[in-house]
Image: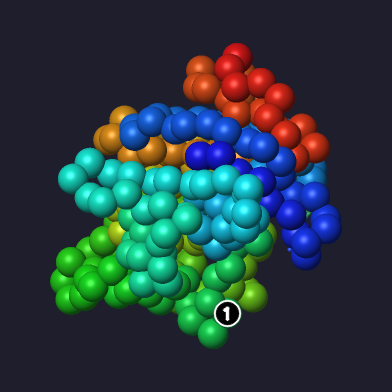
Amino acid sequence: MHVNHTYDGTWKGIEDITFRIEAGEFVFLTGTSGAGKTTLLKHIYMEELPDSGRGGRVVVSFPGVEAYDSSRVNRSGIQTLRREIGVVFQDFRLLTDRDVWENVAFALRVRGHGGRFLRRRVEEVLERARLTHRRHAHPNELSGGEQQRVSIARAIAGEPRIVLADEPTGNLDRENAEGVLEIFRQLHAAGTTIVMATHDLQLLERLPHRRIQLEDGRLKTRWF
Ligand SMILES: Nc1ncnc2c1ncn2[C@@H]1O[C@H](COP(=O)(O)OP(=O)(O)OP(=O)(O)O)[C@@H](O)[C@H]1O
Ligand SMILES: [Mg+2]
């Protein structure tokens, strides 16, 4: 991808960012607050599009499927693309009028699943996110860390090819962060592409993955 993005036509978002992520890779996106990590992730699932004119281009491609190209894709193409991507939003974006179980089930229904498969899969991911005991709670009854884990369970439920995780351990204590890390490690081992924005230096030290480092909206270094 190659991206320039300005918010409201003036405020600098990200500038002249070019990189490529291979299928099956696990990459970290790092940088101080405001560096542009969330903005960059939004470009991958096309919630934001590069500036018009010389703003660049984002291409997401999967084997055997026509590539999604931000310069050509339409609304329905973006909807289809998003079915391949699981997103752990920094601000969670849970459905406040539904309980934990329904929040996760919803992600499967939009992908066309139902019945016994859906029920089994919801139970399974809630178990992995250590949330089984909270399955009937509503988001406003959950701690920040629990909400974060619902957001992770929802993102992985549909077995997406890419998972974009925006500070997925930001609200978790060490033990829960370890649990979440283990989930991502297993997904990666199973072939899922993972892009994780994080401030967590301990996490970066422990996992030997490529790091895309942003500074003030620009690319700093691409490798360890
Ligand atoms: N919707 C918006 N409108 C205007 N400016 C925005 C908007 N979203 C982000 N920005 C600005 O774009 C820059 C990059 O923001 P972004 O959210 O991508 O940073 P970040 O690296 O994710 O930060 P953090 O670590 O705090 O989550 C910041 O200067 C931010 O204030
Ligand atoms: Mg952010």
Q: Residue furthest right?
A: 10
The outermost residue toward the top is 224
Horizontally, residue 114 falls left or right of residue 209, namely: left
Say whether residue 178 is left or right of residue 192. Answer: right
Q: Is residue 101 visible?
A: no
- Residue at 74% x, 50% y: name it: 13
Image point 71% across, 25% down: which residue?
220
Q: Residue shown at 56%/39% (left/top)?
A: 2
| Vertical arrangement, residue 209 with respect to residue 6, above or below | above
Amino acid type indicated by mark 1: Thr
Label 1 crowding class (10 Å Cα cut-off): few <14, some 14-19, many 20+? few
Quadrant in the rendering for residue 154: bottom left
Give residue 92's position: percent from left, percent from top: 59, 62
Give the x, y percent position of residue 51. 64, 55
- In the image, 70 versus 104, the foreground residue is 70
Q: Which image quadrant for residue 217?
A: top right
Looking at the rendering, which quadrant does residue 56 occupy?
top right
Q: Which residue is mark 1?
A: 96
